[in-house]
Image (cartoon, helix red, strand yellow):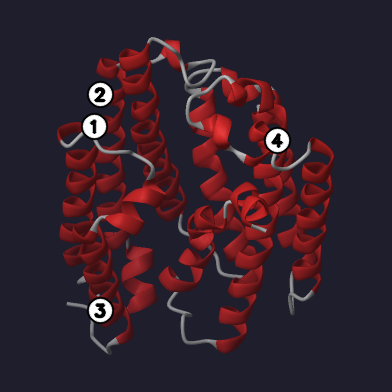
Amino acid sequence: MKNILLLLRPQQWIKNGFVFIPLFFGGRLLHPSDALSSLITFLAFCFAASSVYCFNDIIDVEADRRHPVKQLRPIASGSVSIFAAYVLMALMLLGAGIWLVLLPQHQGETAAVIGFYFVLNMAYCSYLKQYAIVDVCIVAFGFVLRIIAGGVATHIILSNWLVLMTFLLALFLSFAKRRDDVLRMNETGEAPRRNTGRYNLTFINQAITITGGVTLVCYIMYTVSPEVVSRFNTSHLYLTSIFVLVGLLRYIQLTVVDQKSGDPTKVILHDHFMQAIVVLWLLAFLIIIYTPTSIE
């Protein structure tokens, strides 16, 4: 059971929390039917993502066996056979389909989004991840598909600024994670990925700075956009930008100054400062959009 869980990587399911973004930013957090639809979509995405993880480890099994850390993965170590991994992959994909059937509305549209995510990641695992820049763009687009699925399932129209901000934030996090690979390559002389040699610290650091800055600008533009001000009947959302700024700076500090892993899952789960920033941002946003105010 332990090896199966390692293969499915449930700790990575936190990424699928992006499915709830339309619900949260749409001001529909307290609507039971929309909350249920978002939860079911989240679970469907978790199962689909785990199916992708199985396929990825099957494709990379030979490379993983030569890697000092990845050789401990269930398939690479021989703890789980390739046949069993394929069976598990199919079961998780079937599970995603079952969850989608339980959606009270928009099953077909939501299934199409998750299906496209699955097919795109099959192509990514098989071929596309060897191309630098293309790889991080596909990873980032996967997060956009998550919020699109959340919006489709709840019939919440997404702001263009919100979609763009999600893509840029995911791109920022992806570059920070690639920084780990470059550091490991510089230390050991071996590239963790086939395209790691196409990156270097100078490029990665500049990419992190650019995407982080543009993400902040997009967030501010979102909070002051007429559409959002009208939807929430408040012009105070820009105040939450301070938490976004501090969060981005903290993330850069962890990866660039402290040389810690840029894996967003590890950062969120282990860094208490970042956890506090996220909680404070959530509270501030909730107070502003769910407390009756007037436009000033």
Element under disc 3? helix
Q: Which mark is residue 78?
A: 4
Q: Answer with mark 3 or mark 2, whichever residue precedes in sequence.
A: 2
Crowding near pointer 2: few (<14 within 10 Å), some, many (20+)? Answer: few
Query: Residue drawn 62% across and 56% down?
Result: 2
Residue at image mark 1: 209
**Which corner quadrant of the image does residue 233 belong to?**
bottom left
Question: For this view, does 112 lie left or right of residue 190?
Answer: right
Residue at image mark 2: 206
- The total number of labels drawn is 4
Element under disc 4? loop
Query: Residue drawn 53% across and 87% down?
Result: 31
Q: CA distance from mark 2 to mark 4?
A: 40 Å
Q: Answer with mark 2 or mark 4, whichever residue precedes in sequence.
A: 4
Residue 134 position within the rendered picture, expressed as x and y whole percent measured from the top left: 53, 24
Question: For this view, does 169 lie left or right of residue 77?
Answer: left
Quadrant of the image containing the N terminus: bottom right
Residue at image mark 3: 288
Viewer-side label of 4, 1: 4
Element under disc 1? helix
**Residue type beneath disc 4:** Gly
- The one nearer the camera, 220 or 88, is 88
Q: CA distance from mark 1 to mark 3?
A: 29 Å
**Residue type beneath disc 2:** Gln
Residue 186 position within the rendered picture, expressed as x and y whole percent measured from the top left: 32, 14
Relative to 121, residue 49 above or below: below
